[in-house]
Structure formats: C-alpha cells, structure tokens
Image (cartoon, helix red, strand yellow):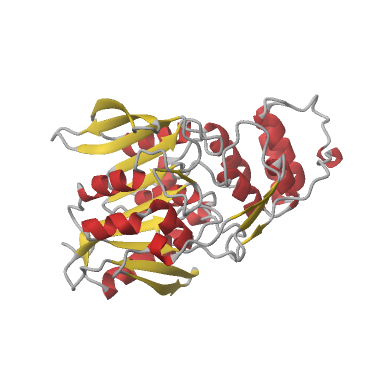
C-alpha cells in the first residue's frame, strides 16, 4: 500500500469514527513502514496492552506510557493530538513511565508585585472563552501595546504566564498581555483546534473568539490600536499563525514558537503528517488579501513533536510575496544553547521576519521559567526577543482608520 493509499484509508477510518485504526496506520507509515499489500486489513490491527495517558487538570498530573502516540489511539481525536503536540518532556532514550506531578504556579511566578491579573469572558455565536489580562502597575489610562498569548495543549493562562514570564517583561516595557483560555469542552486536551478548516477562517470558530477577546480588551482599556500582537506555543503558535493570516488588519506582528503555518492541516491525518514532516497549504483558502505580517519564529532543531521544518514553512508562507535580504547571526547563550538567528530585511532596511533556530533544543519555550510547563531555561530568551521584535512594528492602518 502506497503512502497516499494509507492516508486515504486513515482519513476514511477517522471519518467513520475509528481513530484507533487510523492512528496506528499513520504511525506505521511515519516510521517508514507500509502495509504488505493492497489487501491490508485495518480491522485486524491490535494495540499494545497499555492504558492511555491521562491528565488530571485539577491535580496537574500527567501519566505517560512507553508508546503515548499508539496508546492515545483509544481515545478521542483531541487526546491523540495532545500527546503529539505537547509532551511534558522530550526524550532521547526510553520514555518516562509513571506519574509526573507539577504544583500549580504561585502568584509571584505569574505577576509582578503591584500589577493586576484579572479574569474576563467573551462570547459570540461561535461560543465563549474565558481569558486573563495582565495590567501593568504603571498603567494610568495611557494607550499601551497589547500582546495576545495563546497557550499550548494541557496548559492554562496561569501556567503559560509563569513559564514564559511575559508579564514580567511586559511590566518593564509597559504592555497589556491577554491569555485566552481554551475550554476542555472544545478540546479535551485544551489544544486550540488549529487543524480544523472551520477554525482557520476569519469571522468563524476559534479565530472569531480570539479576535473578539482582543477587540473587547481594546474597548475596555486604553490600547494602542497600532500595536496589538499575537503569539503562541505549539498548538497556540499554530493558532497565532492563523490569526496573523486571517486578521492582519488587527494584529501588527506574529510570534510562532514551535508551531505550524496556517492551513497545513485540515483534519487529523493531515495534522499528524504536518507535525511529522511539514505540510502544504492553499493560499486562496487560508490567506487574506493584505500583505503578510512581520513574523518572528522560534524552533528547536531537536523538536521531536513538531518537526523543525514547520518553522521554515511559517516564514515561507509569510515571506512568499516579499523581496528581502537575509542576515545571519550565530551565537550561544552562556552556559546554554547555541542558535542561528536569520533576519529578513526589506528594502527600507527594516527586519520584518526573524527565524531563531535553537540548536539542541526540543519542544519547549526557549529561555522560559521552570515554574511553567514546556520550558527550556537554557535560552535564548524567546519572551524578551519576541517583545523586542513586536515593539519594532506597528500597523500602518489600524482598525477604524480611514
């Protein structure tokens, strides 16, 4: 059976409500195997006798098995994507077994003293989402930039804020930071549903909810409409790429950490393939008619969850219609990771795209704090560099301008 036949068969099985067979079939293909002949029977597939990983959101407890991808085939599609998108650790040897427990982050890990971290909710016909908003201590009604941060699978706004320490840098730079929260009812693992075609379109699904949260904050507080930005990690990074492609009249720049380009997947099988080896997209289907936004990408070259080629594809999609010159800088964080930073410079000499290829890093927020999940303290500091990049860019025609 050829790979194309395997993909078609996996798609058929998924639509038929048989994710067990579909996942095993795809995993066999991704490992380089194939069915022995055209008479391959998916109804004869047997799974290892292990229980699937479970996550208790209240206890922050994760149980992993030696084969999480295969074990997850016994549960719903979002649970499969949870293990494939966001794992608690990258492993080069045998996988951890048993239970890994994380204490919830403390308040001093989330918000600087004197600042506020308030709760809000937004609703529209697509549903409702809660969010947290960071308000810096020195805010007194003056217009400030706003950064919208989209967490990864299994994370929460509090966990993501603690891990990235974005609130602390925003306190220094005087910015609002919003953290929309994915609901477990929308996705069991609290992943943003970046791989669904209905959640890749302006004015529909999750993009409309994230944009709605952004606009609600802009109405309720004094936000500089020229300086509104969106960023994310993993599934949240893929969602951020979608927001940049579909709402480039709202956001001035995009940050994509360990994520995927807009439209590289439209269902579960194509999502698994894109995560493993990158994917393609249809510009007409997913991109609006205005110029792509300035974009900064961070990706570890040892990421075994989302293949590093996806970081290249994010910039390929953004820069496809731009004429730029590349400037390459190589460096190393003292006691940490080496990296290659590639800056794409436009005719005016402005850096409009950046790609940080972090050598030896896995699927984790670069330079983050161990107070949060999916972080690699060995740097470089993605939070500080991302905010620096954002504040170098502003919308020429912000919402509501003529």
320 to 369, vertically: above or below: above
**Quadrant placement of the C terminus:** bottom left
- The answer to whether residue 220 is left or right of residue 1 is left
Residue 54 percent coordinates (x, y)? 69, 55
Q: Say left or right for 29 vs 181.
A: right
Instruction: Name the residue furthest right.
Output: 44
Residue 247: name its quadrant: bottom left
Q: Looking at the picture, tell me which residue is in the foreground, 251 or 91.
A: 91
**Farthest residue toward the front?**
335
Q: Position of residue 358 (x, y in %)?
A: 40, 32
Q: For the point 27% across and 69% down, which residue is it?
A: 218
Image check: 401 left or right of 282?
left
At x 40%, y 32%, the residue is 337
Is residue 348 positioned above or below 292 on the image? above
Residue 167 in which image quadrant:
bottom left
Q: Nearer the viewer, residue 330 or 347?
A: 330
Q: Quadrant of the N terminus?
A: top right
266 vs 129, nearest the viewer? 129
* Residue 292 visible in the snapshot: no
Picture quadrant of residue 173: bottom left
Tell me if I can see residue 100 in this picture: yes
The x, y position of residue 349, in whole percent, is 14, 34
> How many marks can you see?
0
Q: Position of residue 123 (x, y in %)?
A: 45, 73
């Amino acid at each position: 059976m050829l790979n194309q036949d395997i993909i078609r068969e996996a798609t058929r099985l998924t639509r038929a409500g048989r994710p067990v067979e579909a996942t095993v079939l795809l995993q066999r293909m991704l490992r380089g195997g194939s069915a022995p002949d055209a008479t391959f029977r998916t109804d004869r597939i047997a799974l290892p006798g292990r229980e699937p990983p479970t996550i208790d959101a209240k206890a922050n407890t994760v149980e992993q098995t030696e084969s999480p991808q295969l074990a997850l085939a016994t549960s719903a599609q979002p649970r499969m994507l949870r293990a494939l998108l966001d794992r608690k650790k990258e492993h080069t040897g045998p996988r951890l077994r048993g239970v890994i427990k994380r204490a919830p982050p403390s308040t001093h890990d989330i918000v600087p003293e004197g600042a506020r971290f308030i709760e809000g909710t937004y609703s529209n016909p697509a549903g409702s989402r809660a969010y947290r908003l960071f308000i810096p201590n020195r805010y007194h009604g003056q217009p400030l930039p706003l950064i919208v941060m989209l967490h990864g699978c299994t994370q929460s706004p509090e966990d993501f804020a603690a891990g990235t320490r974005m609130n602390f840098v925003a306190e220094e730079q005087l910015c609002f930071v919003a953290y929309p929260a994915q609901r477990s009812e929308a996705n069991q693992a609290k992943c943003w549903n970046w791989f669904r075609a209905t959640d890749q379109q302006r004015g529909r699904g999750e993009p409309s909810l994230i944009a709605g949260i952004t606009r609600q904050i802009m109405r309720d507080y004094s936000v500089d409409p020229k300086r509104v930005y969106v960023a994310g990690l993993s599934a949240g990074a893929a969602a951020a790429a979608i927001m940049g492609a579909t709402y480039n009249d709202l956001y001035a720049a995009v940050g994509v950490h360990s994520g995927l380009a807009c439209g590289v997947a439209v269902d579960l099988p194509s999502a698994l393939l894109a995560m493993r080896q990158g994917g393609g997209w249809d510009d007409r289907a997913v991109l609006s008619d205005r110029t792509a936004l300035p974009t900064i990408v961070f990706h570890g070259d040892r990421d075994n969850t989302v293949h590093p080629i996806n970081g290249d594809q994010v910039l390929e999609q953004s820069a496809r219609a731009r004429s730029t010159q590349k400037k390459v800088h190589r460096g190393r964080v003292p006691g940490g990771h080496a990296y290659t930073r590639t800056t794409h410079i436009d005719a005016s000499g402005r850096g409009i795209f950046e790609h940080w290829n972090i050598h030896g890093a896995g699927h984790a927020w670069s330079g983050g704090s161990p107070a949060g999940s999916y972080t690699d303290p060995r740097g470089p500091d993605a939070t500080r560099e991302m905010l620096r990049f954002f504040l170098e860019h502003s919308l020429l025609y912000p919402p509501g301008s003529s």
